[in-house]
Amino acid sequence: MAELVTFLLPALPLLALLATLLLGRYPGCDAIVRVAERLAEHGESGHGKTRSAALPKPPRSFAPSGGLLIALGLAQRPPPVAA
């Protein structure tokens, strides 16, 4: 019996979500609708467009980064040419 409980205990949230979806209820749907309405109101007022246009662009960096930085760090000088 203890093995069944230890198996089902982590699965309970998944089973609860599955049950609500099968019954036609979608958890969080109301919150998604409220956020979408707020974003629509914010976009209509025009504040979002002026604020994003006023932000300066970050300076462009020509320094190597990521894989190129690692490659340059691990690169070694080739052997000298025999004369």
Image (spheres, rainbow, N blue to C red):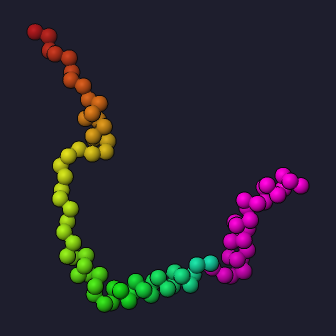
x 84%, y 52%: residue:
3
* Residue 70 image position (x, y, % from top left): 31, 37
Q: Is residue 17 magenta?
A: yes
- Quarter of the figure with residue 40: bottom left
Magenta stretch prevailing secondary structure? helix
User: Where, quadrant-wise, is the N terminus in this rendering?
Assistant: bottom right
x 33%, y 85%: residue:
43
Q: Residue furthest top?
A: 83
Residue range in magenta is 1-26
Question: Height in image: 68 above or below 30?
Answer: above
* Residue 33 image position (x, y, % from top left): 51, 85
x 25%, y 35%: residue:
72
- Quarter of the figure with residue 5: bottom right
User: Where, quadrant-wise, is the C terminus in this rendering?
Assistant: top left
x 47%, y 82%: residue:
35
Task: Depth check: give the residue in front, 56 or 68.
Answer: 56
Q: Residue furthest left?
A: 83
Q: How many marks?
A: 0
* Residue 56 image position (x, y, % from top left): 19, 69
* Residue 73 image position (x, y, % from top left): 27, 33
- Quarter of the figure with residue 38: bottom left
Question: Height in image: 43 above or below 53?
Answer: below
Question: Height in image: 66 above or below 13?
Answer: above
Q: In the image, is 18 to the left or to the right of 64?
A: right
Q: Residue furthest right?
A: 1
Q: Is residue 31 magenta?
A: no
Q: In the image, is 78 to the left or to the right of 16?
A: left
